[in-house]
Image (spheres, rainbow, N blue to C red):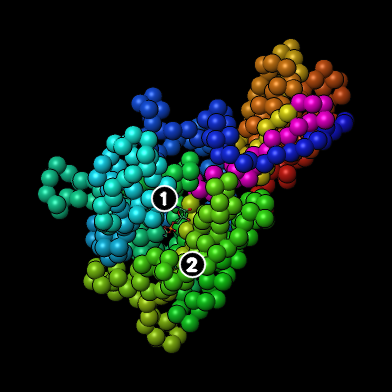
Amino acid sequence: MGSQAPASSRRLERMDDLVALCARRGFVFPSSEIYGGINGFWDYGPLGVELKSNLKRAWWQRVVRERADVVGIDSSIITHPRTWEASGHVEFFSDPMVDCRACKKRFRADQIDDAGPCSAREGTSQHEFTEPRNFNLMLQTRIGASEEAASIAYLRPETCQAIFNDFKRVREVARQKIPFGIAQIGKAFRNEINPRNFTFRSREFEQAEMEFFCHPSERERWFEHWLQERLRFHRDLGFDERRLRTRAHAADELAHYCKVAQDVEYRFPFGWQEIEGVHDRGDWDLGRHSEYSGKDLGVTDPETKEHFVPMVIETSIGIDRTCLALLCDAYAEEELENGETRTVMRVHPALAPIQVAVLPLSKKLADPARALEQELRRRFHVFYDEAGNIGRRYRRQDEAGTPFCVTVDFDTASDGKVTVRDRDSMDQERVATAGLVAALAPRLEFPG
Ligand code: GAP
């Protein structure tokens, strides 16, 4: 059957368009909306949670399952508070802040140009700033009923520190030898002063981190290996190459634990920004945790008997940021030759929240359509919709990013075929129901 190539296509230019689509369709929206929201916190709806979990699964598959030299863990979010003294976060993990003496608002010292008008001095930007002071970004909580300082604990600002805490035990139980890696996906928390750009800078977010432990003589080789591996992953996510680049950190940008860092950056509508960091952390973490815990976290080479503290090459991807980049990259507004317009999310089919939509042409076809839906559900994430005209149902699936719509029509009963409509080309083809799973499956796989 015929195609309906778009006459013109426009990419995402204004974040507001994406924010509106995400709320309207239930990808992502403000947390606690009924109370007016809470700055820096977001909820993922039915479509968003699927996108996010598909991204996490693709990462886990690539970094853990496909390799013999990386194993996974799932640690507690709250760790012994000494962890954060050892890691350097209590001492160093802070941003210089200024307060406005007039309106009492607080800003990052490097962002006062964006401070906006001073609410105490009607409409003018005449803030009166204090001298910069360091403000620690870790979120605190208390454990137990005691009000003593000793009860203070931190919500982890990065997921990797538990990997260092657990390094010795995991190496033993997994029977791993250097070089090898430990990976984990989980929530991290930072008391960001100015959360901004939708989910880009949030106070609660997810990271997927992998710490690779190697001999000091091999650190450059493994750094390069992991940087290339991570770039391959981002390309496989389907990002437009022109919006993906790496950027080396200058010496004055490096985090306190870091010797060398390369960011993977995506070009958002608000500029080039980091979505993942590849870091050479040297022996900072294992060295400090050995010192603070009194436990030797060094290893002995079984052949040479050399005892050394392994070097750490880290890959650290923000799951929410990468989801945001995927959503930005996927967004397109197209004018069709018939004069209609459509908004389509061209997200990689393997990451799409809904993989197949089953759409009977008429409600009278509900029985065979429901039977097909049940069969497809065993293999794919399926959505069933029988309401409204078929064009409108296609448009809804385009906005959700559904790669394939399967239409059951009045010929299906006699010829055993359905119409499969491709989201991107809008081409339609007749496919035998019996071979449908086999026809769709390879087109919905993430590359290995
Ligand atoms: N363990 C190293 C580490 O945490 P990072 O560069 O501070 O390094 C890694 O963070 C990734 O975590 C970033 O590339 C970003 O994708 C994500 N990330 C960091 N802060 C974030 C925030 N406030 N909101 C959303 N994602 C954030």
Q: Is residue 86 above or below residue 202?
A: below
Q: Where's ligand 1: which quadrant?
A: bottom left
Q: Residue at x 66, y 45 (%)?
A: 348
Name the residue carrying label 2: 249
Quadrant of the drawing holding the N terminus: top right
Q: Position of residue 3 (x, y in %)?
A: 84, 33
Q: Is 219 left or right of 297, judged from the image as shown?
A: right
Numbered disc 1: secondary structure: helix
Residue 183 located within the stretch drawn in magenta? no
Q: How many marks?
A: 2
Q: Earlier in the sequence, mark 1 or mark 2?
A: 1
Q: Residue at x 35, y 26 (%)?
A: 35
- Circle 2: residue type: His
- Circle 1: residue type: Asp
Numbered disc 2: secondary structure: loop
> What residue span does the magenta drawing correspond to?
319-340
Q: Position of residue 329 (x, y in %)?
A: 63, 45
The disc label shown at residue 383, or none:
none
Q: Is residue 76 visible?
A: no
Question: Which of the two residues, 382 or 84, is positioned nearer the viewer here?
Answer: 84
Name the residue carrying label 1: 113
Dot 2, how many residues are within 10 Å of its Cα: few (below 14), some (14-19), or many (20+)? some
